[in-house]
Image (spheres, grey):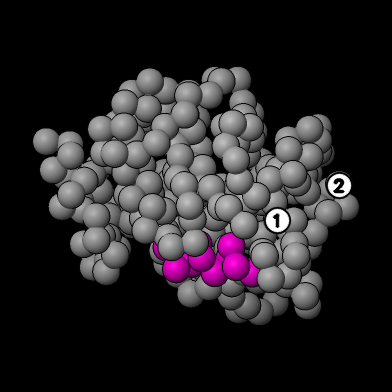
Amino acid sequence: MKVAAIIPVRYSSSRFPGKPFADIEGLPMIVHTLKRTELCKDIDEVYVATDTQSIYELVEKVGGNAIMTSSKHKTGTDRITEAAKNIECDIVVNVQGDEPLVDPKHISKVINLLIQTNSEVATLLCNTDRVNDFTDCKVVLDKFNNILYMSRSDIPSNHFSNTTMTKLYCIVPFKKDFLVKFSLMPQTPLELIEHIEYLRIIENGYKMLGVLVDSNSISVDTPDNLNYVRKLMVVDKIKHKYLEDALNDLR
């Protein structure tokens, strides 16, 4: 199966405008996400899909592939669907642009499990102990590791126990035909309440496989998230594979 990763990126984030250009170890955040995704051995092609010319130009400057898309998309998944229409592939991996700590081996794991289980869509997950953090999308699973529900609230309830929560680690491979089907579904009530687009899958009666890995990765939605990532990047063991070359490209 041919696998394409598409990283949806826009400049005008409502919670953190301009975050794709946020500096981490001298590189804009989106470059970290791009270069780490390119290191994944199970991906054939990597693209950045954006509605912003400056992001397009940055990606090309560091040797990446960029695709301009509409500025009218409501979700990142809608953006990658537009980009995927002209890409020949069997699987499209949505790699969120604000995951600069993504591990290429984790991407491989969720891709391979998607193929082995004959699922239509899957997502990486990791554990978190951050309570009352509404930037995290928490999930609960059934005993077959299918997602039952997702919320920005703490689930399952920590009111009676100290149960570790599980959250989205936003690397989401789709079978391409299911991605197109998903994009044609109207937004759903719970999706709109929680502001989590993947609830649309569950609300329409489809299953979404969750793949749990050991990771400190975090989606950068706020300046506090960015400071957290900057601290972890200091001791990161993957950055040496791309950092120097990418810095040279930007000089």
Along the viewing direction, whichever of 235 and 5 lies nearer the viewer: 5
From the top left corner, tell me how far across and down residue 218 is, in percent: 45, 57
Circle 1 residue: 121
The residue lying at 44 percent from left, 37 percent from top is: 48
Pick the quarter of the image with the C terminus. top left
**What is the secondary structure assignment of the residue under circle 1?**
loop
From the top left corner, tell me how far across and down residue 17 is, in percent: 40, 30
- Per the rendered image, the range of residues in magenta is 104-113
For the residues marked 2 and 1, what is the alpha-carbon distance in whole angstroms?
A: 13 Å
The residue lying at 69 percent from left, 51 percent from top is: 175
The reply to whether the C-beta atoms of the residues labelled 2 and 1 are less than 8 Å apart is no
Which image quarter: residue 72? Answer: top right
The answer to whether residue 49 shows anywhere in this view is: yes
The residue lying at 59 percent from left, 31 percent from top is: 86
The residue lying at 42 percent from left, 32 percent from top is: 66
Mark 2 or mark 1, which is nearer to you? 1
Circle 2 residue: 204
Q: Please, what is the dominant secondary structure of the magenta stretch?
A: helix
Sequence-first disc among 2 and 1: 1
Pick the quarter of the image with the N terminus. bottom right
Name which residue type carries label 2: Asn
From the top left corner, tell me how far across and down residue 37 is, in percent: 41, 53
Q: Is residue 108 magenta?
A: yes
Name which residue type carries label 1: Val
Badge number at residue 75: none
Along the viewing direction, whichever of 12 and 1 lies nearer the viewer: 1
